[in-house]
Amino acid sequence: MKLKNDQLSGRDIRRKLFNGWMLAVLFMATLVTVLPLFNIFVYVLKQGIPALNLDFFTQLPAPVGETGGGMANAMLGSLTLVFLAAALGVPVGIAAGVFLSEYKESKLAHPLRFGVDLLTSIPSIIVGIFAYALVVRPIGHFSAYAGALALAIIIIPIVARTTEEILRLVPVHIREAGLALGIPRWRVILVVVLKGTRAGVITGVMLAVARAAGETAPLIFTALNNKFWARSLDQPIASLPVTLYNYAISPYEDWHRQAWAAALVLMVFVLVLNLVTRLTIGRVAKGRKRD
Amino acid sequence: MSRAPKKREEHFGDRLFLWILRGVAVAVLLLLAAIAIEVFDVASPAFRKFGAGFLLSNNWDPVNEEFGALAFIYGTVVSSLIALCIAVPISVGAALFLTEIALEGLSKPVSFLIEMLAAIPSVIYGLWGIFVLAPWMRTTLQPWLGEHLGFIPLFSGPGYGVGMLTAGIILAIMITPTISAICREVFNAVPQIQREAALALGATRWEMIRTAVLKSSGLGIFGAVILGLGRALGETMAVTMVIGNRPEISSSLFAPAHTMASVIANEYAEAAGDMHLSALAAVGFSLFVVSFLINFIARLLLFRPVSGRS
Protein backbone atom coordinates (compact mmCIF):
# COMPACT_ATOMS: atom_id res chain seq x y z
CA MET A 1 0.00 0.00 0.00
CA LYS A 2 1.67 3.14 -1.14
CA LEU A 3 1.40 5.97 1.40
CA LYS A 4 1.35 9.62 0.51
CA ASN A 5 4.72 10.54 1.99
CA ASP A 6 6.70 7.58 0.68
CA GLN A 7 9.25 9.73 -1.15
CA LEU A 8 12.61 9.83 0.59
CA SER A 9 13.34 13.34 1.77
CA GLY A 10 16.75 14.90 1.24
CA ARG A 11 17.46 14.47 4.89
CA ASP A 12 16.69 10.78 4.76
CA ILE A 13 19.03 10.29 1.86
CA ARG A 14 21.76 12.05 3.77
CA ARG A 15 21.15 9.84 6.79
CA LYS A 16 21.35 6.74 4.63
CA LEU A 17 24.58 7.85 3.00
CA PHE A 18 26.10 8.71 6.34
CA ASN A 19 25.02 5.34 7.64
CA GLY A 20 26.72 3.56 4.78
CA TRP A 21 29.84 5.62 5.29
CA MET A 22 30.00 4.86 9.03
CA LEU A 23 29.50 1.15 8.46
CA ALA A 24 32.37 1.22 6.02
CA VAL A 25 34.50 3.06 8.58
CA LEU A 26 33.75 0.39 11.18
CA PHE A 27 34.69 -2.28 8.69
CA MET A 28 37.96 -0.51 7.95
CA ALA A 29 38.68 -0.32 11.67
CA THR A 30 38.32 -4.09 11.91
CA LEU A 31 40.59 -4.54 8.92
CA VAL A 32 43.25 -2.27 10.40
CA THR A 33 43.09 -4.26 13.63
CA VAL A 34 43.78 -7.56 11.95
CA LEU A 35 46.26 -6.30 9.36
CA PRO A 36 49.36 -6.16 11.63
CA LEU A 37 48.75 -9.77 12.61
CA PHE A 38 48.97 -10.88 9.02
CA ASN A 39 51.98 -8.71 8.37
CA ILE A 40 53.87 -10.07 11.36
CA PHE A 41 52.85 -13.58 10.45
CA VAL A 42 54.02 -13.22 6.87
CA TYR A 43 57.36 -11.73 7.88
CA VAL A 44 58.10 -14.32 10.53
CA LEU A 45 57.36 -17.04 8.02
CA LYS A 46 59.23 -15.33 5.20
CA GLN A 47 62.36 -14.65 7.23
CA GLY A 48 62.17 -17.56 9.60
CA ILE A 49 61.63 -20.54 7.34
CA PRO A 50 64.82 -20.08 5.27
CA ALA A 51 66.74 -19.61 8.49
CA LEU A 52 65.66 -22.89 9.98
CA ASN A 53 68.04 -25.76 9.55
CA LEU A 54 69.24 -28.73 11.52
CA ASP A 55 72.09 -26.68 12.97
CA PHE A 56 69.60 -24.34 14.55
CA PHE A 57 68.16 -27.10 16.63
CA THR A 58 71.33 -28.94 17.46
CA GLN A 59 74.22 -26.49 17.66
CA LEU A 60 75.37 -24.10 20.33
CA PRO A 61 75.80 -20.45 19.37
CA ALA A 62 78.89 -19.67 17.33
CA PRO A 63 81.45 -17.19 18.70
CA VAL A 64 80.43 -13.56 18.44
CA GLY A 65 80.54 -12.28 14.89
CA GLU A 66 80.92 -15.65 13.24
CA THR A 67 78.17 -17.15 11.16
CA GLY A 68 76.56 -20.46 11.87
CA GLY A 69 75.73 -22.12 15.10
CA GLY A 70 72.29 -22.60 16.56
CA MET A 71 70.06 -22.20 19.56
CA ALA A 72 69.93 -25.66 21.00
CA ASN A 73 70.90 -24.42 24.44
CA ALA A 74 68.28 -21.68 24.31
CA MET A 75 65.54 -24.15 23.48
CA LEU A 76 66.54 -26.56 26.21
CA GLY A 77 66.88 -23.63 28.57
CA SER A 78 63.39 -22.40 27.79
CA LEU A 79 61.97 -25.86 28.32
CA THR A 80 63.79 -26.13 31.65
CA LEU A 81 62.67 -22.75 32.89
CA VAL A 82 59.06 -23.24 31.86
CA PHE A 83 58.98 -26.71 33.37
CA LEU A 84 60.34 -25.47 36.70
CA ALA A 85 58.04 -22.48 36.67
CA ALA A 86 55.02 -24.66 35.94
CA ALA A 87 55.97 -27.12 38.68
CA LEU A 88 55.85 -24.25 41.13
CA GLY A 89 53.11 -22.10 39.69
CA VAL A 90 50.50 -24.53 38.38
CA PRO A 91 49.63 -26.26 41.69
CA VAL A 92 49.41 -22.90 43.45
CA GLY A 93 47.28 -21.49 40.66
CA ILE A 94 44.92 -24.45 40.55
CA ALA A 95 44.54 -24.42 44.33
CA ALA A 96 43.75 -20.70 44.24
CA GLY A 97 41.26 -21.23 41.42
CA VAL A 98 39.58 -24.09 43.27
CA PHE A 99 39.35 -21.96 46.39
CA LEU A 100 37.80 -19.06 44.51
CA SER A 101 35.25 -21.26 42.83
CA GLU A 102 34.32 -23.71 45.58
CA TYR A 103 34.64 -21.60 48.69
CA LYS A 104 33.13 -18.36 47.43
CA GLU A 105 31.59 -17.81 50.85
CA SER A 106 34.95 -17.54 52.58
CA LYS A 107 36.10 -14.13 53.79
CA LEU A 108 39.37 -14.69 51.93
CA ALA A 109 37.64 -15.11 48.59
CA HIS A 110 37.12 -11.47 47.76
CA PRO A 111 40.63 -10.32 48.67
CA LEU A 112 42.08 -13.29 46.84
CA ARG A 113 40.20 -12.50 43.67
CA PHE A 114 41.38 -8.92 43.89
CA GLY A 115 44.91 -10.14 44.55
CA VAL A 116 44.87 -12.49 41.57
CA ASP A 117 43.61 -9.71 39.32
CA LEU A 118 46.38 -7.51 40.60
CA LEU A 119 49.03 -10.14 40.01
CA THR A 120 47.86 -10.43 36.42
CA SER A 121 48.40 -6.75 35.86
CA ILE A 122 51.89 -6.38 37.34
CA PRO A 123 54.35 -5.46 34.58
CA SER A 124 56.51 -8.51 34.02
CA ILE A 125 59.68 -6.51 34.43
CA ILE A 126 58.69 -5.72 38.00
CA VAL A 127 58.27 -9.43 38.64
CA GLY A 128 61.83 -9.71 37.38
CA ILE A 129 63.05 -7.14 39.89
CA PHE A 130 61.31 -9.09 42.65
CA ALA A 131 62.92 -12.37 41.63
CA TYR A 132 66.23 -10.54 41.44
CA ALA A 133 65.78 -9.18 44.95
CA LEU A 134 64.70 -12.52 46.35
CA VAL A 135 67.04 -14.97 44.63
CA VAL A 136 69.83 -13.24 42.73
CA ARG A 137 70.83 -10.76 45.40
CA PRO A 138 71.37 -13.22 48.28
CA ILE A 139 73.08 -15.86 46.11
CA GLY A 140 75.25 -13.32 44.37
CA HIS A 141 74.77 -14.42 40.77
CA PHE A 142 72.07 -15.03 38.17
CA SER A 143 70.44 -18.42 38.09
CA ALA A 144 67.78 -20.54 36.47
CA TYR A 145 65.98 -20.67 39.82
CA ALA A 146 65.47 -16.93 39.78
CA GLY A 147 64.12 -17.05 36.24
CA ALA A 148 61.83 -19.92 37.08
CA LEU A 149 60.47 -18.04 40.10
CA ALA A 150 59.70 -15.00 37.98
CA LEU A 151 57.89 -17.12 35.39
CA ALA A 152 56.00 -18.98 38.12
CA ILE A 153 54.65 -15.68 39.43
CA ILE A 154 53.39 -14.93 35.94
CA ILE A 155 51.81 -18.37 35.63
CA ILE A 156 49.93 -18.37 38.95
CA PRO A 157 47.26 -15.74 38.24
CA ILE A 158 46.56 -17.04 34.74
CA VAL A 159 46.01 -20.59 35.96
CA ALA A 160 43.96 -19.38 38.93
CA ARG A 161 41.67 -17.35 36.73
CA THR A 162 41.06 -19.99 34.10
CA THR A 163 40.60 -22.73 36.71
CA GLU A 164 38.02 -20.65 38.52
CA GLU A 165 36.16 -19.93 35.29
CA ILE A 166 36.10 -23.56 34.25
CA LEU A 167 34.98 -24.82 37.64
CA ARG A 168 32.25 -22.20 37.74
CA LEU A 169 30.69 -23.80 34.69
CA VAL A 170 29.92 -26.98 36.62
CA PRO A 171 26.28 -26.78 37.71
CA VAL A 172 25.63 -26.61 41.43
CA HIS A 173 23.43 -29.68 41.44
CA ILE A 174 26.40 -31.91 40.64
CA ARG A 175 28.09 -30.86 43.84
CA GLU A 176 24.85 -31.13 45.75
CA ALA A 177 24.30 -34.63 44.41
CA GLY A 178 27.71 -35.70 45.63
CA LEU A 179 27.18 -34.15 49.05
CA ALA A 180 23.72 -35.70 49.28
CA LEU A 181 25.29 -39.11 48.72
CA GLY A 182 27.45 -38.52 51.79
CA ILE A 183 30.70 -37.85 49.97
CA PRO A 184 32.84 -35.40 51.98
CA ARG A 185 33.19 -31.94 50.45
CA TRP A 186 36.85 -32.27 49.64
CA ARG A 187 36.16 -35.48 47.78
CA VAL A 188 33.32 -33.91 45.89
CA ILE A 189 35.65 -31.16 44.74
CA LEU A 190 38.62 -33.32 43.87
CA VAL A 191 36.87 -36.32 42.38
CA VAL A 192 33.56 -35.10 41.05
CA VAL A 193 34.20 -31.52 40.00
CA LEU A 194 37.86 -31.56 39.04
CA LYS A 195 37.70 -34.85 37.23
CA GLY A 196 34.97 -33.68 34.92
CA THR A 197 36.66 -30.40 34.15
CA ARG A 198 40.13 -31.84 33.71
CA ALA A 199 40.30 -30.90 30.03
CA GLY A 200 39.38 -27.28 30.70
CA VAL A 201 41.84 -26.92 33.57
CA ILE A 202 44.64 -28.46 31.51
CA THR A 203 44.01 -26.12 28.63
CA GLY A 204 44.12 -23.22 31.08
CA VAL A 205 47.51 -24.47 32.19
CA MET A 206 48.65 -24.64 28.56
CA LEU A 207 47.61 -21.01 28.05
CA ALA A 208 49.73 -20.00 31.02
CA VAL A 209 52.66 -22.08 29.82
CA ALA A 210 52.44 -20.49 26.38
CA ARG A 211 52.55 -17.08 27.96
CA ALA A 212 55.49 -17.96 30.21
CA ALA A 213 57.42 -19.43 27.30
CA GLY A 214 57.27 -16.12 25.46
CA GLU A 215 58.23 -13.85 28.35
CA THR A 216 61.51 -12.04 28.06
CA ALA A 217 61.56 -9.12 30.48
CA PRO A 218 61.51 -11.11 33.70
CA LEU A 219 64.40 -13.24 32.50
CA ILE A 220 66.91 -10.63 31.42
CA PHE A 221 68.20 -10.08 34.87
CA THR A 222 67.25 -13.25 36.64
CA ALA A 223 68.24 -16.15 34.44
CA LEU A 224 70.27 -13.82 32.24
CA ASN A 225 71.64 -15.81 29.33
CA ASN A 226 74.26 -18.41 28.65
CA LYS A 227 76.30 -19.10 25.55
CA PHE A 228 76.64 -22.73 26.53
CA TRP A 229 74.61 -25.43 28.16
CA ALA A 230 73.76 -24.55 31.75
CA ARG A 231 75.72 -26.87 33.94
CA SER A 232 73.43 -26.51 36.90
CA LEU A 233 70.24 -24.73 37.83
CA ASP A 234 71.94 -22.17 40.01
CA GLN A 235 73.78 -20.79 36.99
CA PRO A 236 72.53 -18.46 34.27
CA ILE A 237 70.65 -20.29 31.58
CA ALA A 238 69.86 -19.49 27.97
CA SER A 239 66.28 -19.08 26.83
CA LEU A 240 64.70 -18.59 23.45
CA PRO A 241 63.11 -15.16 24.00
CA VAL A 242 66.20 -13.66 25.65
CA THR A 243 68.51 -15.01 22.96
CA LEU A 244 66.10 -13.69 20.35
CA TYR A 245 66.26 -10.28 21.96
CA ASN A 246 70.05 -10.24 22.19
CA TYR A 247 70.44 -11.33 18.60
CA ALA A 248 67.86 -8.87 17.30
CA ILE A 249 69.55 -5.84 18.80
CA SER A 250 73.02 -6.97 17.78
CA PRO A 251 74.78 -5.64 14.67
CA TYR A 252 75.38 -9.08 13.12
CA GLU A 253 73.42 -10.14 10.04
CA ASP A 254 73.67 -13.82 10.81
CA TRP A 255 72.32 -13.26 14.28
CA HIS A 256 69.38 -11.37 12.81
CA ARG A 257 68.69 -14.33 10.57
CA GLN A 258 68.72 -16.66 13.57
CA ALA A 259 66.51 -14.28 15.51
CA TRP A 260 63.82 -14.71 12.86
CA ALA A 261 64.18 -18.47 13.09
CA ALA A 262 63.77 -18.26 16.86
CA ALA A 263 60.73 -16.06 16.37
CA LEU A 264 59.22 -18.66 14.07
CA VAL A 265 59.78 -21.47 16.56
CA LEU A 266 58.44 -19.40 19.43
CA MET A 267 55.43 -18.16 17.52
CA VAL A 268 54.46 -21.61 16.28
CA PHE A 269 54.73 -22.98 19.81
CA VAL A 270 52.68 -20.20 21.36
CA LEU A 271 50.03 -20.04 18.65
CA VAL A 272 49.50 -23.79 18.48
CA LEU A 273 49.03 -23.94 22.25
CA ASN A 274 46.59 -21.04 22.12
CA LEU A 275 44.66 -22.54 19.24
CA VAL A 276 44.25 -25.89 20.96
CA THR A 277 43.27 -24.11 24.14
CA ARG A 278 40.59 -21.95 22.55
CA LEU A 279 39.10 -24.84 20.63
CA THR A 280 38.98 -27.12 23.67
CA ILE A 281 37.63 -24.49 26.06
CA GLY A 282 34.98 -23.62 23.51
CA ARG A 283 33.90 -27.24 23.35
CA VAL A 284 33.95 -27.66 27.14
CA ALA A 285 31.86 -24.53 27.64
CA LYS A 286 29.37 -25.63 25.01
CA GLY A 287 29.16 -29.12 26.45
CA ARG A 288 28.37 -27.82 29.90
CA LYS A 289 25.66 -25.49 28.71
CA ARG A 290 23.84 -28.40 27.13
CA ASP A 291 23.35 -30.08 30.55
CA MET B 1 25.98 -45.73 49.39
CA SER B 2 25.49 -47.76 52.57
CA ARG B 3 28.71 -47.14 54.49
CA ALA B 4 27.90 -44.95 57.50
CA PRO B 5 30.11 -41.83 57.29
CA LYS B 6 32.74 -41.79 60.02
CA LYS B 7 31.89 -38.27 61.11
CA ARG B 8 35.19 -37.28 62.65
CA GLU B 9 37.28 -38.56 59.74
CA GLU B 10 35.37 -36.72 57.08
CA HIS B 11 35.17 -33.55 59.06
CA PHE B 12 38.91 -33.81 59.41
CA GLY B 13 39.35 -34.31 55.68
CA ASP B 14 37.19 -31.32 54.93
CA ARG B 15 38.90 -29.16 57.49
CA LEU B 16 42.37 -30.12 56.28
CA PHE B 17 41.43 -29.44 52.68
CA LEU B 18 39.97 -26.06 53.56
CA TRP B 19 43.04 -25.13 55.56
CA ILE B 20 45.37 -26.08 52.75
CA LEU B 21 43.40 -23.97 50.31
CA ARG B 22 43.25 -21.12 52.77
CA GLY B 23 47.01 -21.40 53.15
CA VAL B 24 47.47 -21.09 49.41
CA ALA B 25 45.15 -18.09 49.31
CA VAL B 26 47.09 -16.36 52.06
CA ALA B 27 50.36 -17.27 50.35
CA VAL B 28 49.24 -15.62 47.13
CA LEU B 29 48.25 -12.46 48.99
CA LEU B 30 51.57 -12.50 50.84
CA LEU B 31 53.34 -12.90 47.52
CA LEU B 32 51.70 -9.73 46.30
CA ALA B 33 52.79 -7.88 49.40
CA ALA B 34 56.26 -9.37 49.14
CA ILE B 35 56.67 -8.10 45.60
CA ALA B 36 55.80 -4.57 46.66
CA ILE B 37 58.07 -4.75 49.70
CA GLU B 38 61.08 -6.32 48.02
CA VAL B 39 61.06 -3.99 45.05
CA PHE B 40 60.79 -1.05 47.42
CA ASP B 41 63.65 -2.50 49.40
CA VAL B 42 65.99 -2.51 46.41
CA ALA B 43 64.76 0.95 45.53
CA SER B 44 64.97 2.60 48.92
CA PRO B 45 68.59 3.79 48.78
CA ALA B 46 67.72 5.80 45.70
CA PHE B 47 64.55 7.20 47.23
CA ARG B 48 66.39 8.12 50.38
CA LYS B 49 69.15 9.88 48.50
CA PHE B 50 67.08 11.77 45.93
CA GLY B 51 63.69 12.04 47.59
CA ALA B 52 60.82 13.41 45.59
CA GLY B 53 63.26 15.08 43.26
CA PHE B 54 63.84 11.68 41.75
CA LEU B 55 60.60 11.93 39.88
CA LEU B 56 61.07 15.55 38.89
CA SER B 57 64.67 15.72 37.78
CA ASN B 58 65.63 15.10 34.19
CA ASN B 59 69.21 14.21 34.92
CA TRP B 60 69.95 10.52 34.39
CA ASP B 61 73.68 10.20 34.78
CA PRO B 62 74.94 6.77 35.87
CA VAL B 63 78.56 7.90 35.60
CA ASN B 64 78.18 10.69 38.14
CA GLU B 65 75.54 8.80 40.12
CA GLU B 66 72.91 11.44 39.57
CA PHE B 67 69.49 9.98 38.87
CA GLY B 68 66.29 11.69 37.86
CA ALA B 69 63.46 9.78 36.25
CA LEU B 70 61.54 12.58 34.54
CA ALA B 71 62.61 11.55 31.04
CA PHE B 72 61.21 8.08 31.59
CA ILE B 73 57.94 9.34 33.01
CA TYR B 74 57.65 11.61 30.01
CA GLY B 75 58.43 8.72 27.66
CA THR B 76 55.91 6.44 29.30
CA VAL B 77 53.18 9.06 29.28
CA VAL B 78 53.71 10.18 25.70
CA SER B 79 54.10 6.73 24.17
CA SER B 80 51.01 5.53 26.01
CA LEU B 81 49.08 8.60 24.88
CA ILE B 82 50.03 8.01 21.26
CA ALA B 83 49.04 4.38 21.62
CA LEU B 84 45.66 5.30 23.08
CA CYS B 85 44.95 7.93 20.44
CA ILE B 86 45.55 5.37 17.74
CA ALA B 87 44.15 2.28 19.42
CA VAL B 88 40.92 3.55 20.99
CA PRO B 89 39.02 4.61 17.85
CA ILE B 90 40.21 1.53 16.01
CA SER B 91 39.40 -0.88 18.84
CA VAL B 92 35.99 0.59 19.52
CA GLY B 93 35.23 0.60 15.81
CA ALA B 94 36.28 -3.00 15.41
CA ALA B 95 34.32 -4.04 18.50
CA LEU B 96 31.21 -2.32 17.17
CA PHE B 97 31.63 -3.98 13.81
CA LEU B 98 31.99 -7.39 15.40
CA THR B 99 29.04 -7.09 17.75
CA GLU B 100 26.58 -5.06 15.70
CA ILE B 101 27.25 -5.63 12.05
CA ALA B 102 29.13 -8.81 11.35
CA LEU B 103 27.27 -12.08 11.14
CA GLU B 104 28.33 -14.78 13.55
CA GLY B 105 30.17 -16.63 10.80
CA LEU B 106 32.43 -13.62 10.39
CA SER B 107 32.66 -12.28 13.91
CA LYS B 108 33.76 -15.55 15.49
CA PRO B 109 36.88 -16.14 13.37
CA VAL B 110 37.81 -12.47 13.39
CA SER B 111 37.50 -12.26 17.18
CA PHE B 112 39.67 -15.33 17.30
CA LEU B 113 42.28 -13.67 15.10
CA ILE B 114 42.30 -10.63 17.36
CA GLU B 115 42.86 -12.87 20.36
CA MET B 116 45.80 -14.43 18.53
CA LEU B 117 47.26 -10.95 18.21
CA ALA B 118 47.21 -10.75 21.98
CA ALA B 119 49.03 -14.04 22.35
CA ILE B 120 52.09 -13.08 20.31
CA PRO B 121 55.06 -12.56 22.64
CA SER B 122 56.34 -9.03 23.03
CA VAL B 123 59.82 -9.86 21.70
CA ILE B 124 58.38 -10.93 18.38
CA TYR B 125 56.57 -7.60 18.11
CA GLY B 126 59.90 -6.00 18.87
CA LEU B 127 61.71 -8.01 16.23
CA TRP B 128 59.09 -7.08 13.67
CA GLY B 129 59.31 -3.51 14.89
CA ILE B 130 63.07 -3.30 14.36
CA PHE B 131 63.18 -4.92 10.94
CA VAL B 132 59.82 -4.06 9.39
CA LEU B 133 58.09 -1.16 11.12
CA ALA B 134 61.13 1.02 11.84
CA PRO B 135 62.51 0.93 8.29
CA TRP B 136 59.02 1.69 6.98
CA MET B 137 58.80 4.62 9.39
CA ARG B 138 62.19 5.86 8.30
CA THR B 139 61.58 5.58 4.56
CA THR B 140 57.84 6.26 4.30
CA LEU B 141 55.86 7.62 7.20
CA GLN B 142 58.32 9.97 8.87
CA PRO B 143 59.41 11.73 5.68
CA TRP B 144 55.73 12.09 4.71
CA LEU B 145 54.85 13.56 8.10
CA GLY B 146 57.90 15.80 8.04
CA GLU B 147 56.98 17.08 4.61
CA HIS B 148 53.33 17.79 5.26
CA LEU B 149 53.21 18.50 8.99
CA GLY B 150 56.82 19.41 9.68
CA PHE B 151 55.87 22.90 10.87
CA ILE B 152 54.40 21.31 14.00
CA PRO B 153 57.23 20.71 16.50
CA LEU B 154 55.82 17.22 17.05
CA PHE B 155 56.95 16.15 13.63
CA SER B 156 60.13 18.09 13.33
CA GLY B 157 63.61 16.79 13.13
CA PRO B 158 65.11 13.81 11.33
CA GLY B 159 63.36 10.49 11.53
CA TYR B 160 65.55 7.51 12.23
CA GLY B 161 62.79 4.96 12.24
CA VAL B 162 63.15 4.17 15.90
CA GLY B 163 61.72 6.66 18.35
CA MET B 164 58.71 7.73 20.33
CA LEU B 165 56.24 7.57 17.47
CA THR B 166 57.27 4.06 16.44
CA ALA B 167 56.98 2.89 20.03
CA GLY B 168 53.54 4.46 20.26
CA ILE B 169 52.42 2.70 17.11
CA ILE B 170 53.63 -0.69 18.26
CA LEU B 171 51.99 -0.17 21.63
CA ALA B 172 48.76 0.69 19.84
CA ILE B 173 48.87 -2.61 17.97
CA MET B 174 49.49 -4.47 21.19
CA ILE B 175 46.72 -2.94 23.27
CA THR B 176 44.05 -3.06 20.56
CA PRO B 177 43.05 -6.67 21.33
CA THR B 178 42.61 -5.81 25.02
CA ILE B 179 40.46 -2.74 24.47
CA SER B 180 38.49 -4.39 21.70
CA ALA B 181 37.72 -7.54 23.69
CA ILE B 182 36.40 -5.62 26.67
CA CYS B 183 34.40 -3.28 24.48
CA ARG B 184 32.81 -6.30 22.86
CA GLU B 185 31.69 -7.57 26.25
CA VAL B 186 30.37 -4.15 27.14
CA PHE B 187 28.42 -3.87 23.90
CA ASN B 188 27.04 -7.39 24.22
CA ALA B 189 25.71 -6.47 27.64
CA VAL B 190 23.42 -3.84 26.15
CA PRO B 191 19.90 -5.30 26.14
CA GLN B 192 18.65 -6.23 22.70
CA ILE B 193 15.43 -4.35 23.41
CA GLN B 194 17.20 -1.01 23.26
CA ARG B 195 18.52 -1.78 19.81
CA GLU B 196 15.13 -2.92 18.60
CA ALA B 197 13.48 0.16 20.04
CA ALA B 198 15.82 2.46 18.15
CA LEU B 199 15.32 0.57 14.92
CA ALA B 200 11.57 0.55 15.43
CA LEU B 201 11.66 4.32 15.68
CA GLY B 202 13.22 4.47 12.24
CA ALA B 203 16.87 4.84 13.06
CA THR B 204 19.45 3.74 10.51
CA ARG B 205 21.91 1.08 11.60
CA TRP B 206 24.55 3.61 12.58
CA GLU B 207 22.03 5.82 14.37
CA MET B 208 20.89 2.81 16.33
CA ILE B 209 24.49 2.00 17.26
CA ARG B 210 25.13 5.56 18.29
CA THR B 211 22.05 5.98 20.43
CA ALA B 212 21.29 2.53 21.80
CA VAL B 213 24.74 1.01 22.17
CA LEU B 214 27.40 3.70 22.41
CA LYS B 215 25.55 6.11 24.60
CA SER B 216 24.96 3.64 27.42
CA SER B 217 28.40 2.05 27.16
CA GLY B 218 30.38 5.18 27.93
CA LEU B 219 31.60 4.00 31.30
CA GLY B 220 32.46 0.54 30.04
CA ILE B 221 34.43 1.90 27.11
CA PHE B 222 36.30 4.20 29.44
CA GLY B 223 37.12 1.21 31.63
CA ALA B 224 38.38 -0.71 28.61
CA VAL B 225 40.56 2.23 27.66
CA ILE B 226 42.02 2.45 31.16
CA LEU B 227 42.73 -1.27 31.10
CA GLY B 228 44.45 -0.85 27.75
CA LEU B 229 46.47 1.98 29.26
CA GLY B 230 47.48 -0.34 32.09
CA ARG B 231 48.71 -2.85 29.58
CA ALA B 232 50.60 -0.18 27.65
CA LEU B 233 52.36 1.02 30.79
CA GLY B 234 53.80 -2.40 31.49
CA GLU B 235 54.87 -3.25 27.95
CA THR B 236 58.60 -3.67 27.96
CA MET B 237 60.33 -5.63 25.25
CA ALA B 238 58.66 -4.35 22.11
CA VAL B 239 59.08 -0.78 23.35
CA THR B 240 62.74 -1.28 24.30
CA MET B 241 63.49 -2.54 20.83
CA VAL B 242 62.00 0.38 18.90
CA ILE B 243 62.18 3.41 21.10
CA GLY B 244 65.80 4.32 20.57
CA ASN B 245 66.83 4.11 24.22
CA ARG B 246 67.85 7.67 24.87
CA PRO B 247 66.96 9.16 28.28
CA GLU B 248 66.00 12.56 26.88
CA ILE B 249 62.92 14.71 26.60
CA SER B 250 62.29 16.07 23.17
CA SER B 251 59.38 17.88 21.61
CA SER B 252 59.56 15.82 18.46
CA LEU B 253 57.85 12.47 18.21
CA PHE B 254 60.58 11.30 15.87
CA ALA B 255 63.21 11.55 18.58
CA PRO B 256 64.46 8.50 20.46
CA ALA B 257 63.28 8.22 24.03
CA HIS B 258 62.95 5.86 26.96
CA THR B 259 60.04 4.61 29.02
CA MET B 260 60.10 3.52 32.63
CA ALA B 261 59.91 -0.11 31.61
CA SER B 262 62.40 0.13 28.76
CA VAL B 263 65.16 1.77 30.79
CA ILE B 264 64.97 -1.03 33.35
CA ALA B 265 65.18 -3.66 30.63
CA ASN B 266 68.05 -1.84 29.01
CA GLU B 267 70.27 -1.01 31.95
CA TYR B 268 69.46 -3.36 34.82
CA ALA B 269 71.60 -6.35 33.91
CA GLU B 270 74.70 -4.17 33.50
CA ALA B 271 73.97 -1.54 36.10
CA ALA B 272 77.09 0.39 37.04
CA GLY B 273 77.03 0.20 40.79
CA ASP B 274 74.52 -0.19 43.56
CA MET B 275 73.02 3.27 43.32
CA HIS B 276 72.35 2.78 39.62
CA LEU B 277 70.58 -0.49 40.38
CA SER B 278 68.64 1.11 43.18
CA ALA B 279 67.61 3.99 40.94
CA LEU B 280 66.35 1.55 38.33
CA ALA B 281 64.40 -0.33 40.99
CA ALA B 282 62.99 3.01 42.11
CA VAL B 283 61.76 3.59 38.55
CA GLY B 284 60.30 0.11 38.72
CA PHE B 285 58.52 0.78 41.98
CA SER B 286 57.02 3.97 40.59
CA LEU B 287 55.83 2.02 37.58
CA PHE B 288 54.35 -0.61 39.89
CA VAL B 289 52.40 2.00 41.84
CA VAL B 290 51.09 3.74 38.73
CA SER B 291 50.16 0.46 37.09
CA PHE B 292 48.37 -0.68 40.25
CA LEU B 293 46.34 2.53 40.44
CA ILE B 294 45.39 2.41 36.77
CA ASN B 295 44.24 -1.20 36.93
CA PHE B 296 42.38 -0.58 40.16
CA ILE B 297 40.46 2.28 38.57
CA ALA B 298 39.73 0.14 35.53
CA ARG B 299 38.26 -2.67 37.64
CA LEU B 300 36.07 -0.19 39.51
CA LEU B 301 34.75 1.20 36.25
CA LEU B 302 34.11 -2.16 34.71
CA PHE B 303 32.48 -3.89 37.63
CA ARG B 304 29.12 -2.27 37.13
CA PRO B 305 28.34 -2.02 33.43
CA VAL B 306 29.44 -5.58 32.60
CA SER B 307 27.33 -7.61 35.03
CA GLY B 308 29.89 -8.92 37.49
CA ARG B 309 32.68 -10.31 35.36
CA SER B 310 35.42 -7.90 34.30
Image (cartoon, coloured by chain):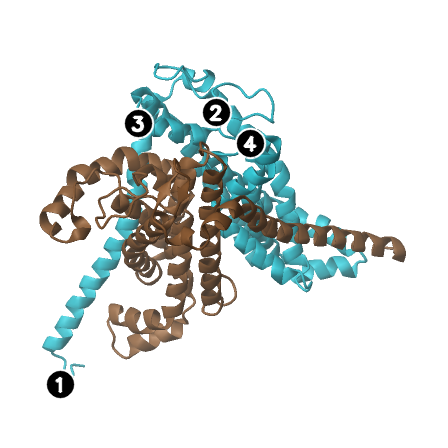
Position of B104 compared to A111: left or right? left
Of marks 1 and 2, the one in the foreground: 2
Shade representing chain B: brown
Position of A220 compared to B163: left or right? right
Q: Looking at this view, is A226 or A161 the one in front?
A: A226
Q: Looking at this view, is B153 or B3 the one in front?
A: B153
Marks 3/1: CA distance?
66 Å
Name the image quarter holding residue A253: top left
Residues at circles 1 and 2 in contact by the CB criterion of under 8 Å: no
Residues at circles 3 and 1 in contact by the CB criterion of under 8 Å: no
Q: Looking at this view, is A122 or A88 the one in front?
A: A122
Sooner in the amino-acid sequence: mark 1 or mark 4: 1
Q: Is residue B230 above or below residue B130?
A: below
Shade representing chain A: cyan
| Residue under the point 23% across and 54% down | A28
Quadrant for the N terminus of chain A, please.
bottom left
Amino acid type at mark 3: Gln
Quadrant for the C terminus of chain A, please.
bottom right
Position of A24 compared to B42: left or right? left
Amino acid type at mark 4: Leu
Sooner in the amino-acid sequence: mark 3 or mark 2: 3
The image shows residue B37 at horizontal and vertical percentages of: 58, 50
Is residue B181 in view from this perspective? no
Q: Which residue is mark 4?
A: A81
Marks 1/4: CA distance?
77 Å
Of marks 3 and 1, the one in the foreground: 3
Say few, some or many: other residues with alpha carbon within 10 Å of mark 3 (under 14 / 14 to 19 / 20 or more). Answer: some
- Chain letter for mark 3: A
